[in-house]
């Protein structure tokens, strides 16, 4: 039978399969143990019966060879007298003798006795009787070599009586085994249910989770394979929720921000006069500008979406001094400002130079946008106790206290006192790059006194340790050493870069 294109199979829970396996193994163990004991005891009973018969035979032979007739005090003169005295002196063991089996009335016994010739060895054999199988010892007897004075001394054990007790024990063992298996089944059902509860919870949670709600998590208890599976499942849900949230934010951001330029494009296309060359040319310039803005916005949104991926960064050893100088050199092209190098850190760190340069240039672009022509915009880097710090400082109007809390939100734009780039994504990109490095962004601003944006990376240069006596961020290098280090970073600035306040032409 097929349902929905798949072959239908009856659902058997893991709990049932585990319990069935446990009971099957337990039953197999009980059967093997009981069967082994039964066979050993069965063989032991047979050996014991044979030993008892051999003892009776030895006693009879001793009586026949050395015994005296109690009536005459002389050796036995007839076979009848010998057999009679032997029977009188014999004390039958349990299940031995002529009763409950009347041997003289059993055809199989008589036939077995007839087969044993006089003078032959003793025969011990099992014969069927009306009361069940019997183990019988037949002793041929002949007195004085007289062929007429012959007979047979017969002893038998009723094996059915001997085995009755063993079979009773086997029945008791079977009953106890069934009760034990029942108890194992009840305990196993409870234990397996408790052990497999995380799997059931896992299944129920997976059924309840939807794209609209990925917040539910499974409580982790214990420290075993199932609890580790639960942790792994929760981690997977975290990654899945983060991925879906990133996708949702991307779609919301794109839908929110792209609607305006698309509306502008549509509106101008609807009102453009195709017969007016001037109107067409003006509209073309405006539309191309909006399309370029849409392209930049899409690129920024894609970058923000990629910031959550593990391959977002490409870490490599980077010279801090060279990176700082390169950023300043590139930033000079952003606007007519008085570009200043505040400070330069000396050391090599593991970072992504392209992403870090992009973040610094975003801050520089923001500084140019909210500062006047000819004003100071400074770039710097330093080593502090909390890691590496890279900053951009401007002399613009600064930020109001309430704006600092919201400027890093996507599509947030500052007011006249300061703010972010035109798309509202610049500082979000800076924060994403800093967060991907394990760091963050700090803002130091006073309304009317400019703003300083600092990227803090919790990494230390190779071989560097925080000085014991110096202030955090102060470098041990001399100005000459600084000149040599930065001079090798690039030909544009070269050895002209010195310590704080140096203007870079």
Image (tube, helix red, strand yellow):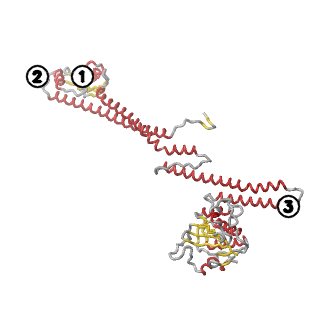
Q: Secondary structure at mark 1?
A: loop
Q: Which label's residue is closer to the chain start, 1 or 3? A: 1
Number of callouts in the render?
Answer: 3
Q: Residue at 36% across / 32% down in the picture?
A: 175
Question: How many residues crowd mark 3 within 10 Å: few (<14), some (14–19), many (20+)?
Answer: few
Q: Residue furthest top?
A: 105
- Residue 432 screen position, x and y as percent: 63, 61
Taking 190 as reference, is 83 left or right? left
Q: Quadrant of residue 472?
A: bottom right
Q: Residue furthest right?
A: 275
Q: Is residue 145 visible?
A: no
Q: Quadrant of residue 79?
A: top left
Q: Which mark is residue 448?
A: none
Q: Nearer the viewer, mark 3 or mark 2?
A: 3
Q: Nearer the viewer, mark 1 or mark 2?
A: 1
- Residue 502 screen position, x and y as percent: 65, 78
State the residue position of label 3. Answer: 281
Q: Secondary structure at mark 2?
A: loop
Q: Residue at 60% across / 62% down in the picture?
A: 435
Q: Which label's residue is closer to the chain start, 1 or 2? A: 2
Q: Nearer the viewer, mark 1 or mark 3?
A: 3
Taking 248 as reference, is 20 left or right? left
Q: CA distance from mark 1 to mark 3?
A: 135 Å
State the residue position of label 1. Answer: 98
Q: Residue at 24% across / 31% down in the picture?
A: 52
Q: Which mark is residue 71?
A: 2
In the rendered image, which quarter contains the N terminus? Answer: top right
- Residue 107 screen position, x and y as percent: 30, 19
Question: How many residues crowd mark 1 within 10 Å: few (<14), some (14–19), many (20+)?
Answer: some
Question: Residue 265 or 329: which is nearer the viewer?
Answer: 265
Q: CA distance from mark 3 to mark 2?
A: 157 Å
């Amino acid at each position: 039978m097929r349902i929905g294109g798949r072959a239908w199979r009856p659902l058997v829970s893991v709990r049932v399969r585990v319990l069935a396996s446990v009971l099957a193994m337990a039953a197999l163990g009980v059967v093997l143990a009981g069967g082994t004991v039964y066979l050993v005891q069965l063989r032991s009973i047979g050996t014991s019966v044979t030993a008892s018969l051999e003892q009776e035979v030895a006693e009879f032979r001793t009586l026949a060879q050395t015994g005296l007739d109690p009536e005459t005090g002389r050796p036995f003169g007839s076979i009848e007298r010998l057999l009679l005295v032997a029977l009188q002196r014999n004390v039958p063991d349990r299940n031995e003798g002529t009763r409950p089996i009347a041997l003289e009335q059993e055809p199989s016994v008589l036939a077995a006795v007839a087969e044993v010739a006089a003078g032959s060895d003793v025969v011990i054999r099992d014969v069927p009787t009306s009361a069940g199988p019997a183990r019988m010892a037949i002793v041929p007897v002949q007195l004085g070599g007289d062929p007429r004075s012959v007979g047979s001394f017969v002893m038998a054990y009723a094996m059915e009586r001997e085995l009755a007790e063993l079979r009773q024990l086997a029945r008791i063992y079977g009953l106890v085994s069934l009760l034990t298996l029942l108890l194992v089944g009840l305990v196993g059902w409870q234990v397996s249910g408790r052990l497999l509860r995380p799997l059931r919870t896992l299944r129920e949670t997976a059924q309840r989770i939807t794209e609209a709600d990925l917040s539910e998590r499974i409580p982790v208890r214990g420290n075993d394979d199932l609890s580790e599976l639960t942790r792994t499942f929760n981690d997977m849900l975290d990654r899945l929720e983060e991925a879906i949230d990133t996708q949702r934010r991307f779609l919301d951001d794109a839908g929110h921000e792209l609607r305006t330029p698309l509306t502008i494009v549509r509106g101008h296309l609807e009102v453009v006069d195709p017969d007016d060359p001037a109107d067409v040319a003006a509209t073309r310039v405006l539309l191309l500008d909006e399309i370029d803005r849409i392209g930049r916005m899409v690129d920024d949104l894609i970058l923000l979406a990629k910031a959550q991926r593990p391959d977002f960064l490409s870490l490599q050893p980077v010279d801090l001094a060279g990176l700082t100088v390169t950023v300043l050199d590139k930033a000079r092209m952003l606007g007519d400002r008085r570009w200043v190098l505040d400070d330069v850190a000396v050391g090599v760190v593991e970072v992504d130079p392209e992403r870090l340069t992009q973040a610094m240039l975003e801050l520089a672009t923001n500084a140019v946008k909210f500062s006047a022509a000819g004003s100071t915009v400074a770039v710097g880097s330093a080593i502090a106790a909390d890691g590496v710090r890279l900053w951009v400082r401007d002399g613009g109007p600064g930020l109001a206290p309430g704006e600092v809390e919201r400027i890093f939100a996507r599509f947030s734009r500052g007011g006249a006192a300061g703010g972010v780039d035109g798309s509202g994504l610049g500082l979000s990109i800076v924060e994403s790059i800093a967060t991907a490095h394990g760091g963050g962004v700090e803002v130091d601003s006073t309304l009317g006194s400019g703003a300083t944006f600092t990227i803090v990376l919790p990494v230390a240069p190779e071989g560097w340790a925080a000085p014991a006596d110096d202030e955090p961020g102060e470098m041990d290098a001399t100005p000459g050493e600084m000149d040599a280090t930065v001079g090798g970073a690039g030909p544009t600035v070269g050895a002209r870069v010195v310590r704080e306040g140096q203007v870079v032409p």
